[in-house]
Image (tube, rainbow, N blue to C red):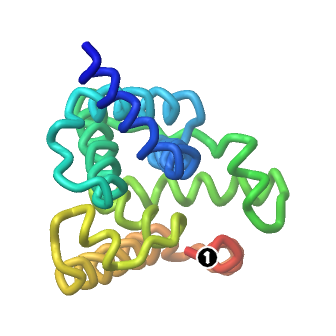
Amino acid sequence: MNQMNDKNELFWQLLKPEYKRAMMYCRKLMQHREKGDDLFQDAIVTAIRKIDQLREQNAFRPWFYRIVINTFNSEIKKHKKRTFMPFDTETEQILPAHNPANIHFANIWLEKLFKALKPDEQSLIILFEMEQWTLAEIGEMYGKSEGAIKPKLFRTRAKLKKELSRLTKNRSAEVTELKKLMNAYAM
């Protein structure tokens, strides 16, 4: 029993510096505060059960995010068709040009664009573009080299651009506004 308490204590100690960022990452993946919190809790439960599989404490961050992504992928498979929710208030406040109309407009386009991506591609874009992870950190999490992640990121971005072009044909006014918003939101 004491050994179990030690493992639980170790887990919480390792999670503490990543807690808030990991929770926000889950919310971004689910694009909904409560669903993101549910994902985060499910990932924590799984991670606590699998803490014995963590080989090195300094590898906790990629190990935990891998569990988050696997939990996210399982959730997506359960619900085949993913519905995107609007950004929650907390996320809206960190976006530039805090304007409800712009936020709504950007949400509509992000929903359309993200539908073209697989869950692992969505994760990659969120980690790199929104969470500002380095290619090396993402590679470590996926168990791949930085050289393997870079082309995957390039292909995923190209896929987004292609989908954007497809969706915006014959919509020049909307495209101009969308490009402004995407630049403002650093996508």
The residue carrying mark 1 is 186
Above or below residue 129? Residue 35 is above
Extreme residue in the front direction = 2
Q: Position of residue 174 (x, y in %)?
A: 66, 71
Q: Is residue 179 visible?
A: yes
Please report the residue visible at 52 percent of the width from the left and 42 percent of the height from the top.
23
User: Looking at the image, which residue is at 37% across and 37% down?
Assistant: 11
The local secondary structure at tag 1 comes to loop
Quarter of the rendering occupied by the C terminus: bottom right
Image quadrant holding the N terminus, namely top left
User: In the figure, is residue 93 to the left or right of 174?
Assistant: right
The mark total stands at: 1
Residue 83: quarter of image: top left
Relative vertical location of residue 176 with respect to residue 164 in this rendering, above or below: below
- 141 horizontally vs 44: left or right: left
User: Considering only vertical position in the picture, is 5 above or below 33?
Assistant: above
